[in-house]
Image: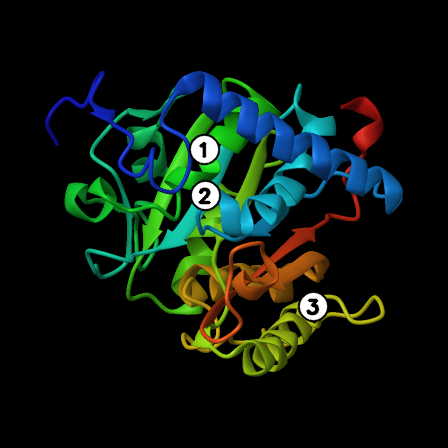
Amino acid sequence: MSDLSDVVRPPAVAGIFYPEDPRECAEQVDGLLAQASARLVDEGWKSAPKAIIVPHAGWHWSGDLGALAWQTLAPRRRTISRVVVLGPTHRVAIRGVALPAATVFRTPLGDLPVPVQQVLSQTADLPCPVHVDTATHAHEHALEVQVPFIQRVLGDVELVPLNVGQASPGEVADIIEALWGSHETVVAISTDLSHYHDGATARRLDADTVRAISMSGDREGGRVEEAAVIPSDRACGASPLNGLLEVCARRGLRPTLLGAHNSGDVPGGEDTRVVGYAAFAVEEDNHDTSTT
């Protein structure tokens, strides 16, 4: 591979999915995080998860849920140094899981380093190793809309942005496990839920999906042999999501619902053709937040 030093993946959807102006971007993300913080306090949320599941629509539609998930990580700001984000491919399909051909990921709020060679090395011996693909990342929004939240909540961390294409849950899970690390790493899955049903249908379908996700992993302290598998018509990020659910099954971890709604519930939304959103947290029983 040629030298990637200082190759930048520039913002592709700033000004469309979230503000392009740095001051406006910071003000909006900070406002969403402040609302999320108040909600978490009201609900008595005290722990910091190892992994989260977040939606990826424009901030107007799902930014509140995205902020809710990212804000749960605020207590770990001083200990998290790497964020692994996996999302689907909306524009350029691929086989497997890919990094961008860039060592810098840029948003209006600044740059985060991408440890390309380290990730390639950590996954090289897997049946489906991570590779590099420029085209699939060039205009993809599912990862980009998360990065300003990361920058405001966690600061200057390493970012591992992974587009997940055609890959089995086991293949994705192997990659997540290889990058899982310990207290220094957090994993995020970027996915929306059902698409373009009427509101009543969407709420029913999304409730079933939320239930399936919530039942993955730990069941009354036991372990499950098989993970839930979410169909692609129930979640646009089903491939990365199913990879995390496989990890939850392997490790006996259970996702906790933080919140859910659809675009018809948002001011300006219509209830005739909606997109569903949800946010979850996955906690490790042995994680001690008292030192963070």
Foreground of the two, 271 or 248: 271
Residue that carries the numbered disc 3 in the rendered image:
214
Residue with the most extreme left position: 2
Q: Is residue 69 left or right of residue 240?
A: right
Residue 82 in sight here: no
Discs 3/1, front: 1
Q: Is residue 254 above or below residue 282?
A: below
Measure how far apart labels 2 and 1 are at the Cα level.
9 Å
Expressed as whole percent of the image width and height from the top left, the position of residue 64 reads 62, 45
Q: Quadrant of the C terminus?
A: top right
What amino acid is at disc 2? Val
Residue at 73% x, 58% y is 256
Q: Which circle's residue, 3 or 2, is located before the other in the chain?
A: 2
What amino acid is at disc 3? Ser
Expressed as whole percent of the image width and height from the top left, the position of residue 179 reads 47, 42
| Crowd rating for badge 2 (residues with CA inside 10 Å; few <14, some 14–19, many 20+) | many
Residue that carries the numbered disc 2 in the rendered image:
85
| Mark 3–mark 2 CB contact (< 8 Å) | no
Foreground of the two, 5 or 230: 230
Expressed as whole percent of the image width and height from the top left, the position of residue 181 reads 56, 38
| Mark 2–mark 1 CB contact (< 8 Å) | yes
Q: Quadrant of the N terminus?
A: top left
Foreground of the two, 144 or 120: 144
Q: Which circle's residue, 3 or 1, is located before the other in the chain?
A: 1
Residue 5 in sight here: yes
Q: Secondary structure at mark 2?
A: strand
